[in-house]
Amino acid sequence: MRVADLLTEHSLQLRLETPTGPDRLSQEIVRCAPTEHLDPTPFLDANVLLLTSGIGMNFSEESIWDGYVERLTRVPVAALAFAVGAAHDSLPKGLITACTAHDLPLLEVPTTVPLLKIDQHVEGMLQAERIALLDRGWLLADECARLASQGAEISTLLAAMYAALELPIAVYDAFDSLIAQYPETVTWRTGAARASQPDTVTVPLPMGLSNSCQLAVRLYGSSAEVEALLAPVTSILALQLNRSVVVDASSHQDMLRFVNRCVAWSESTRSDVANAFHELGLSRRAETTLLVADMSGEHAAAAWKLRVALHDTFHDVRVAELDEQLIALAQFPREEFSEVSKRLLGIEPVLPLVLRGPARTIDELRIALVHALNLIRHVSAPVLAPVLGLSAVVAAAAGRGARESAERFLAPLLEHDEHRATELLPTLRTWLRNDAQPSRTCEELYIHRNSLSYRLRRIEELLGISLDTLDGRATCLMALRLVEIEPY
């Protein structure tokens, strides 16, 4: 209810005695405050309608009236309704002057209208508005529940909420990282800078978590109406977030079993991997996109945003966090893979993330997963993995006697380094890591180029191969990868 609404109510017969503008008259009234205190400000809330008959205010000095009004505007009160007849035959001139000077709407209450009637009218109107607001809130919650039941994304729910509020809206996770927003054109602050974001009301989402997500609304007025309107729909949004991103214990165990079977080449057969994939509830006939992201340290803040993006991008998603890594399998994209990859790779520019897809068979998916788990340890930004990676091929061969052969192949270098305190094996590893470029290798090892040439010739003699050929270099690289491969 606004101050202007009182003037349009003919039964109250109120008259505005100050030249107040439309902006001031549009001020919302929160309740009535009947009082005859000379200084009621310690007992007043902001934006109340002060009702008084001026009993005990039998002074004529304008400075006293000015001080009285000045204290009211400091609260501030929405308006002052002054009843004539009981203590004053007419409005005091000093009061009119003071209200005009401080831009406080002054309403004259005629003798025929008791202040109780104004109080009852305002309370009745406020109650009606609260009921109407509650109805709007439940209608919004019902609409969002209907959308959620049809599998709508978080962004769709935010769009529905924006249509009801006509205010920009966003969802943050517990780390103050932005998960989703509507519309996309609005800029929202994240991290520590979010605390200084002006004109924003934040509502915690009831998610049953110690650190839950929060709904943020950019305000252009009072927050009371927005908070009341959002109260019912926050539960719908929280449930949708949980449905989209929280993996229960059984699904987590299924993902763990699938990953372990994929990387255990010597222990798990193709049938074991296929059965684990089937237990995830995914389709064996559909192409599967794979995503692996590093969630350690500060990267944990991107977890919710990444999970929501996956569910917004694919119809069927399985997500789990294992050893500070988020691993996701997704099927049935909502758009072309080029657009999918553009969105997922653009979530966080410094997030170590490997996207690989789509794999057409279980065997291809297994190779892709092993490659992604190796590649994630070497990237510092989102990357699109190649269709085939050396680490995956090496892992696939490790269970078929190749590791033992690689250890025997490199054994002469190990024995030479142990008995003669040389560094032939580290030199070979560094040389291959630097793409067989002498200058970069010497710079990393802090040795002269002649020393590098001597070491490489000695390596060739001990291994019985030529490092000048691609076959010789590839053999050494494969052997090193096989010996150093990690048991995930």
Image: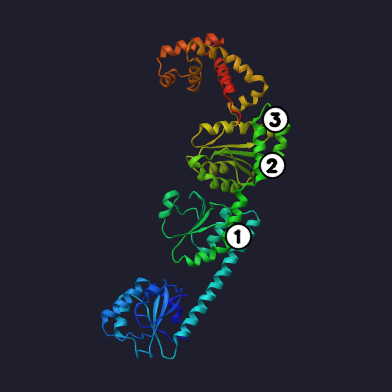
Q: Is residue 446 above or below residue 392?
A: above
Q: Is residue 241 above or below residue 107?
A: above
Report the mark closest to the observer, 3 or 1. Answer: 3
Residue 85 falls in image quadrant: bottom left
Give the amino acid type for the residue marked by disc 3 in the picture. Answer: Ser
- Mark 2 surroundings within 10 Å by alpha-carbon count, few (fewer than 14), some (14 through 19), many (20 or more): some
Give the amino acid type for the residue marked by disc 2 in the picture. Answer: Leu
Q: Is residue 276 above or below residue 408?
A: below
Tell me which label, 3 or 2, sits earlier in the chain.
3
Q: Position of residue 455 (x, y in %)?
A: 47, 12
Q: Position of residue 484 (x, y in %)?
A: 57, 23
Query: What colour scheme was applied to this rendering of the protein?
Result: rainbow
Find numbered disc 2 in the image and state the secondary structure of the residue it sits on. loop
Left or right: 101, with 191 as reference point: left
Residue 220: image tag: none
Give the amino acid type for the residue marked by disc 1 in the picture. Answer: Cys
* Alpha carbons under labels 3 and 2: distance apart: 17 Å
Tell me which label, 1 or 2, sits earlier in the chain.
1
Q: Is residue 61 visible?
A: yes
Report the mark closest to the observer, 1 or 2. Answer: 2
Q: Is residue 284 visible?
A: no
Q: Is the C-beta separation of discs 1 and 2 under 8 Å?
A: no
**Which of these two is toward me, 351 or 436?**
351
* Alpha carbons under labels 1 and 2: distance apart: 29 Å
Find numbered disc 1 in the image and state the secondary structure of the residue it sits on. helix
Residue that numbered label 1 is attached to? 144
Residue that numbered label 2 is attached to? 280
Residue that numbered label 3 is attached to? 268
